[in-house]
Structure formats: structure tokens, C-alpha cells
Image (cartoon, rainbow, N blue to C red):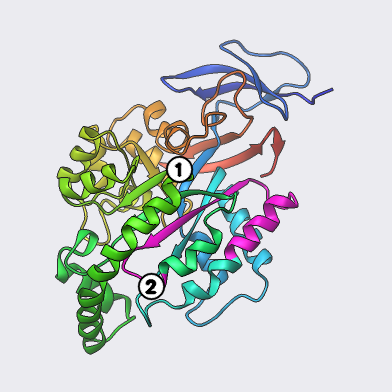
Amino acid sequence: MATETILTNANLILEDKVVKGTIVFTERAVTSIDTGTSSLPAAINVEGDFIAPGIVEMHTDNMEKHFVPRPGVFWPNGLAAALAHDAQMVAAGVTTVYDSICAGSIYGQKDYRREIFSKVIDAVAEGQDKDLFRIDHAIHIRCELTGDELVSDVEPYAAHPLIRLVSLMDHTPGKRQWRNLEDLKRYNLGSGEKTQDQHDADVALRMDIGPKNFEKNWPIIVEMFGSRNIPIATHDDTTEDDVVLGRDAGAVISEFPTTVEAATAAHKHGLATILGAPNVVRGGSHSGGVSASHLATLGLLDGLSSDYVPSSLLQAVVKLNAEFKLPLSQTMGMVTWKIADMVGLKDRGRLKPGARADILRFKVFDDAPIVRTVWSQGERVF
């Protein structure tokens, strides 16, 4: 017989409203939701805490930090690195994560990503296959189309069953994210990664090689993954032309549009938009792009990703509600059902009977969300 969990005296964040009530679920699925209070001995009084669907994360670079914790330092046990990442994600309230790994780099640029590419895939596959993770993992391949070896690096894994999302990136200086060369200069010199001379040489190289590789790689990658019906996202769209290029390739998501023009065009052409939750929390983009909060108030923001800070997801949900007065059901949807729908996960992301029992309990103190408990498929994992 399936074990029941009953949470009562809860603020239940549903798709279109927040209601006081009780939720019941097993390891199979949510079985009931009602607005009453349960007096059953087994019921857990959550004392008014919020109960929401577990967060669905489609773009996080967090795994990379565990494989390469310092420049030039490669963690020797890939599975251990993946398990540490898994624990950090569940602590942020995430129950489904698309681990983002980069493929393709201009010769001599971020070569460590080529070093760890296959190791990350192998570690995620082992953790999933052997049921070692607390939460559900899939793989999001970030294809740097300006990269020299992109196709040869990716092709052996194109049919891997865990690859569930692909994004098409172009980080050529003067385009998209780095359309403003001063923003790129500030980023490179401010991070301490490059000297002025190194920055100048890097920009010259990338402006020369990038467009050539982009033209060569774009149709190959689009065909490779589009033919397998894997969802495709564009990346750093800046103009309507960028969006149309992606739409014509079959893209369904505009990931991190950098301007109001691009976000507006994405909706016009039927693409969902996501931006980084750190953008919301910090009050703006770290690279000169449009404010995610501004797009949210314009109705142009569909979803959020943690990008490089897992805990930013729930913080952004709370901030958009508290500071920008968007309904909590709407802001929570940006990290749950809307993301699930974008990537074709129809079984999760909502609190409703029959949905997968991925459940998050949290409260808010002084505008800071505190994750209390997480259940994955009805099993308490945090």
C-alpha cells in the first residue's frame, strides 16, 4: 500500500491562486487538495508555510563549479562532484534539474569545458541509472556555435537519452550578449581573468573565427537535435532578426533575451522567454542586458533559471511578489509549471491531483525564503 503524506494548515501555491488548505500525496502522485484542515493523526501541521510544486530548473552552470572548483583544478571523482551538485540543488528547492554543460570553444578558450564534457554526462547518467540522486536530472547541452570542435565533440552524444534540451549560443564580440564591447571589456578585466593585452587579442581572435564557425555549425547542430525532437532554445537574442533565426530553426525558447525588443519579438513569434533569477535578485544583468524584473512587469517574462546561483530561484520568486507586486502564483509559476511546459514535462510543476509528487515547503523571513522540506516523488529528500 502506498504511503500517504498529509500536509495541513498550508498556504498552497496553485497555478492561479494561493489557498489555505491540505494536500495529500503518495510516492506515486498528488492524490487530493482541499481547502479544509485535516485532523487526522498522521497529518503534518506546516503552520502556514507555503507548499509549492518542486522547482524545475532548465539552465544551471552549477555542476561545472563542482567539476572545476578552481581554475586548473579538476575534481578527480565525477560522481562525487555530481552528488555534491545534486545536494546543493535540492537545498534550493529544486526537484528537477537540467544540468547545463557547454560544448564548443574557440581554440585555447575555456578548454577545461572540453575536458569535463564527457565526464559530466557519464556522472549524470550513473547517478540517474543507479538512483543515487535525491532529485531528477537531465542534460542541457549549451552549444557554442563559434567553437572550432563543436560538432565533433557533441555528435557522439547526440542520441544520449538524458539530453533533453539544447541551446544555440553565439558569444562573438559585438553580437548578442556582447554587442557592447565595453561591457565585455569590463567583464573580462573586472574578473581578473585577462590583462588588457590578452583581452584585445581575445576579442580580435573571436571576431575573426566566431562568425565563420557559426555559419558552419548552425545548420549541422539544428539538424542533429531537431531531427530527434529535442527542444531547442536560442540564447542572448538581441534583435527580432535573432529571434526569427531561432524560430525558423524550430526553437521554442528564447533564453536570456538581452533587450525589450528581443523579448517582445519572442512572444510575437511564439517563443517562451526565460531570464536569470540572479538578474532579478541583483536588480539587473551583470553583462549589460535588460532587467528581468522590468520584463516581468511588461508581461514579457515567462520563466527563470538560476544560471549561476541555485538559491536565486526562490529569492527571485519572492522578490517579484514582494517588491513588484506580481501574484505569488504567477512568480512561482516562473520556476515550476511554465518551465516544465517549455521542456515538455507534463507530469510535474503543478499542485493538482495526478501530478508527480515533487513538493516544496518553504517560509519567508525578512524577504528571505527558507527551504524547510523537499519531497521528490513523494519521498522526503531534504
The vertical placement of 381 against 12, above or below, is below
Kindly identify the residue that appears in the image at 68 percent across and 65 percent down: 80
Is 137 inside the magenta-drawn segment?
yes
**Is residue 12 toward the left or the right of residue 143 in the image?**
right
Kindly identify the residue that appears in the image at 26 percent across and 63 percent down: 215
The quarter of the image holding the C terminus is top right
- Determine crowd level at label 2: few under 14, some 14-19, many 20+ residues with C-alpha closer than 10 A: many
Kindly identify the residue that appears in the image at 44 percent across and 50 percent down: 225
Q: Which amino acid does label 2 sit on?
A: Ser
Foreground mark, 1 or 2, reads 2
Secondary structure under the numbered disc 2 in the rendered image? loop
Q: Nearer the viewer, residue 218 or 188?
A: 218
Is 9 inside the magenta-drawn segment?
no
Q: Quadrant of residue 332?
A: top left
Q: What separation in Å lies between label 1 and label 2 (alpha carbons)?
A: 32 Å
Residue assigned mark 2: 105
Q: Residue furthest right?
A: 1
Residue assigned mark 1: 314
